[in-house]
Amino acid sequence: MSRVSSGPGQRPRIFRRAPWENGATALIGLGVFMLMQPFSLWLFSNSFAVILAGTIGFVIVSHFPEA
Amino acid sequence: MAVARPGKPVQRAHGLSDRAVAWIFISPTILLLLAINIFPLLWTIYLSFTNYRANQPGRLVQWVGLDNYRNLLGSEDVWGYLQATAHFVGWSIFFQVLLGLGLALLINQKFKGHATLTTLILLPMMLSPAVVGVFWAYIYQPQAGIFNYLVNFFIDAGSFTMIGDVNLAPWSIVLVDTWMWTPYVMLICLAGLRSIPDYIYEAAEVDRASKWRQFWSITLPMVLPFLMLAVLFRAIENFKMFDMVVELTSGGPGSVTELASINLKREAFEKWRTGYSSAFAVILFVTVFGAGNIYVKFLNKVKQR
């Protein structure tokens, strides 16, 4: 079973900032690509939702503890 | 007389605590920020959900929900403007990074006259983008402009017009932006190159590493965070590019150089579709804000080095 907590009284390790921040950054990057790519109108139409999710996610996870 | 307790500084002077004095000093700035930044932003977000037209103030304003966003994100024209923006951002940054890094490596050699050359290279960056747009429009003129003369001097290209041709116009704005902002990328790369300690190269020399190997294993990895910063900063700036391109091509011929910000201005102040253009502004703002978050993340990484 994987460990989800680093010790008694501490926050679960799943809420570490770095991996979530990387995920949010990737989502923003993906959204920007979808917004400006020349291949599919469907990707363009859904790009803003992806960028918005990534940006709001980034603002939230940037308040997570470092370790 | 106030008696200071050990471990706790005296907080009151003339009846005001340090905290209160701090708030008094920063409150004008906060109020100004709220009035000219936060309120317009919230108002724009509100307008993006309405059919408001700024040239018809007496008209009934209706709540249209997500219609403006649906229209924008379903429009092939808007998709085209964002592709034009992507072409401009992508290629201008590619050339700026290539030339900026090359120039930084050259200037870092400290040859005779490198300070004068640095000043000359930095000159375009100090000009106003609108001024640059106007005088490059003269340079690109097919009859009297020096650009056509120079091209025909080296290769026999015949008669052509850079800003009047649908195939050449997107490259004309890339060229001007590259000319103007390569020095900026060079400056950031130079800061990165100067931050590399000499002893690393000395150790590499001892290990008989070739110059090429030193570049790939020392120079490039050490300059990369600086380069990434330059790329992100230029990408954000070019995504919002307006003045230089308006003065140079006005978005033409047709709409091949109509960048997102130029179309936004047309929708807002020529067609007076304020609600629709507010939605467009919100989309561009969230995109730039998201990219700004990435920028701050890389900035922190550079600071931690």
Image (cartoon, coloured by chain):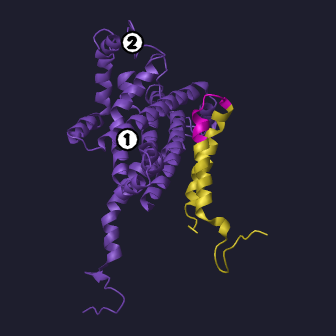
Chain colours: A yellow, B purple
Q: Position of residue A11 (x, y in %)?
A: 64, 73
Q: Residue furthest right?
A: A1
Q: Quadrant of the C terminus of chain B?
A: bottom left
Q: Amino acid at mark 2?
A: Thr
First in sequence: mark 1 or mark 2?
2
Describe the element under mark 2 as helix, strand or loop.
loop
Residue A33 among those drawn in magenta: yes
| Front residue of B279 and B283 | B283
Q: Amino acid at mark 1?
A: Val
Q: Position of residue B65 (x, y in %)?
A: 63, 40
Binning the other alpha carbons within 10 Å of mark 1 as few (below 14), some (14 to 19) or many (20 upward) gives: many
Binning the other alpha carbons within 10 Å of mark 2 as few (below 14), some (14 to 19) or many (20 upward) gives: some
Q: Position of residue B107 (x, y in %)?
A: 29, 41
Checking the image for residue B291, the label placed there is none
Checking the image for residue B161, the label placed there is 2
Describe the element under mark 1 as helix, strand or loop.
helix
Where is mark 1, residue-wise? B185
Question: Residue at 60% across / 40% down in the picture?
Answer: B63
Taken as a whole, is the magenta stretch helix, strand or loop?
Answer: helix
